[in-house]
Image (cartoon, coloured by chain):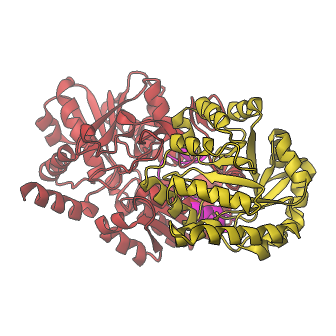
Amino acid sequence: MEKIQQIFDSGKVLITFVTAGDPDLDTTARIIHAIDEAGADIIEVGMPFSDPQADGPVIQAAGQRALKKGTDPGGILSMISGLKGSIKAPLFLMGYYNPVMCYGRDKFIDDAFEAGVSGLIIPDLPFDEDEEFYQKLKEKGMAGILMVAPNSREERLEEIGKNCSGFVYCVSLLGITGDNRGPAAGIEDYLGRVRKYVKIPLALGFGIDGPEKAAQAAAVADGVVVGSALVKIVEKFGNTDRLIPEISSFVTGLKKAVSE
Amino acid sequence: MTRKGYFGQFGGRYVPETLIPVLEDLEEAYLMYSRDRDFNTELKHLLSKYSGRPTPLYFSERLTEQFGGAKVYLKREDLNHTGAHKINNALGQALLASKMGKKRIIAETGAGQHGVASATAAAKFGLECHVFMGVEDMERQALNVEKMRILGAEVIPVTSGSQTLKDATNEAIRDWVTNADTTYYIIGSAVGPHPYPSMVRGFQRVIGDEVREQILEMEGRLPDHLLACVGGGSNAIGIFYPFIEEEQVKMTGVEAAGKGVETGEHAATLTAGSLGVLHGSRSYLLQDDYGQVIPAYSLSAGLDYPGVGPQHSYLMETGRIEYVSVTDEEAVEAFFLLSRLEGIIPALESSHALAHAAKLAPSLSADSLLVVNLSGRGDKDMYSINSFMERREG
């Protein structure tokens, strides 16, 4: 957790997302290396799920491709374990609750910790549905990333402020991932309301599709999350030679936009 | 309920944070209006003058004779406007939506009955209506697709995932996350995040409340056994709920075993599923070894759902209700039996409950009272029945 704080202390933070197993786990490992070298500060690795409620078409389709390849949590954890020592950026796992429950909630946390994962983001697990889950993460020194949205009420923000760790993921609009209307108008007021209660860094995500929006987001938030735009590149270039250079150049551009 | 929104360990609100305030608004509105006299008077008026309630409780002499055991009663939800129990909930929620000032409703549908009911209620209340439906279901239930369009609704084909009810539900949730300011989501079954399972039950319990009154009038006592089919479980919870405290009333929920539970091609979530989280609540579901949801299968599109309402999971766990399953084959047999013996063409969903009645009734004494919830009529199932018979004969 201290490491996460240090990263935010040293400047605006770029967080990038990639779906594990799309097009295959070996390529995901190469993508993670490329993203890390291109300057992403935190890397979110998505675990595919058959019914991803919060995701738009791009990440849904990536998850479907990964599932067709037989990607499962065990495989993802061993891929991540294999990256130990070679990646600067902390790795976070993002996924839905059902596969985690099915794996065994406590065992999943233990195994993720062993694999070197710094934290988990479970968008369909609000902090008050499974308090033990978030407690257990804390005990391990892992971050349980909570989300807030533009419509979150003050009482809720207050509770989230008490229960959050690592950073808080601020959804940029009322919508799903990859919705390029984001960020919504009035984003500064929204983040201001969140800051009243949340004393740890705020990352803004959903619909941030390139350097221009990333720069705007970085002007108001502590960190910027880019997901669908990167997954689209993976979709477009698949396992071709162009994949890694395209990823690198996109992330380099984002990093520059966020840092300036 | 031990925790808010839970039935034992089942239920809850497993949704993205964006939906939390939306669900809180909905819960507040539902709590307020469900206790509001004017709201209830208006709803009661709609159910009676518009939908035709109370639906009859019909003593089926010929089924009783055929089965040779318990006296068989049919709760005629098929006689509702739009042909199924779904209208009870659609009218209730559409009325709530208009009280909440929403201009647009969305719904998911499998068999199309809930879609038609929602489109009907939307027309009645002057609301814009979008219905999400898997492309596979649109083909199986083409007649209902046409009906929804005639009623002024837009049917949105869902091509993601398995292209059936569960994916239509995902799409509806995504639309709702995006448009919650203007849009009300009418969930069609007793599933989803809190408060939906309780609210849908609240709008469907009229079935059981009427049965109680009717059977007391006809027989002077409560029934011995209630039967209902279970997909998500709204008609079942509707008829069961008012009797839950009556220990002498036995109840059985009948799931779809499709081609047989052992084949893996079924929708018997409680019989053969395991604990998980789907569509916002913790309940039983059909999933693989890695927690990926397995598409359900049933000839009946309305039972073809890999989850089940959380209260049913709880009632199974506590042993209050027994859950069994019957195959496509058995359901089709019961479909023809009722059609030929009583001149009532039942929905394929309801035929599952009838098929179990055929097994159960002979084991009960001649003075016992068995009530089967005939949740809908079978007009919509002609295509499914015909292709099933062709496959069987071919």
Magenta segment boundaries in residue numbering: B174-198
Tell which of B93 and B144 is nearer to you.
B144
Residue drawn 61% across and 62% down? B176
In this picture, is B101 found above or below A164? below
Q: In yellow, which chain?
A: A
Residue drawn 58% across and 41% down? A77
Lateral position of residue B42 relative to residue A8, left or right: left
Tell which of A254 and B92 is nearer to you.
A254
Residue B249: image location, x then y, percent: 38, 26
Residue A72 in view in this figure: yes
Q: Toward which corner of the image does residue B93 lie, by quadrant?
A: bottom right
Q: Toward which corner of the image does residue B2 lie, by quadrant?
A: top right
Rendering colour (chain B): red
Q: Quadrant of the N terminus of chain A?
A: top right
Residue B309: image location, x then y, percent: 48, 42
Residue drawn 57% across and 50% down? A47
Residue B310: image location, x then y, percent: 51, 38
Q: Toward which corner of the image does residue A185 lie, by quadrant?
A: bottom right
Residue A14: image location, x then y, percent: 78, 60
Lateral position of residue B164 relative to residue B103, left or right: left
Tell which of B353 and B296 is nearer to you.
B296
Q: Is residue B336 magenta?
A: no
Lateral position of residue B19 relative to residue A157, left or right: left
Extreme-left residue of the structure = B393
Residue A171 in view in this figure: no
Q: Quadrant of the C terminus of chain A?
A: bottom right
Tell which of A205 and B394 is nearer to you.
A205
Lateral position of residue A157 relative to residue B279, left or right: right
Q: Is residue B178 magenta?
A: yes
Residue drawn 25% across and 37% down? B262
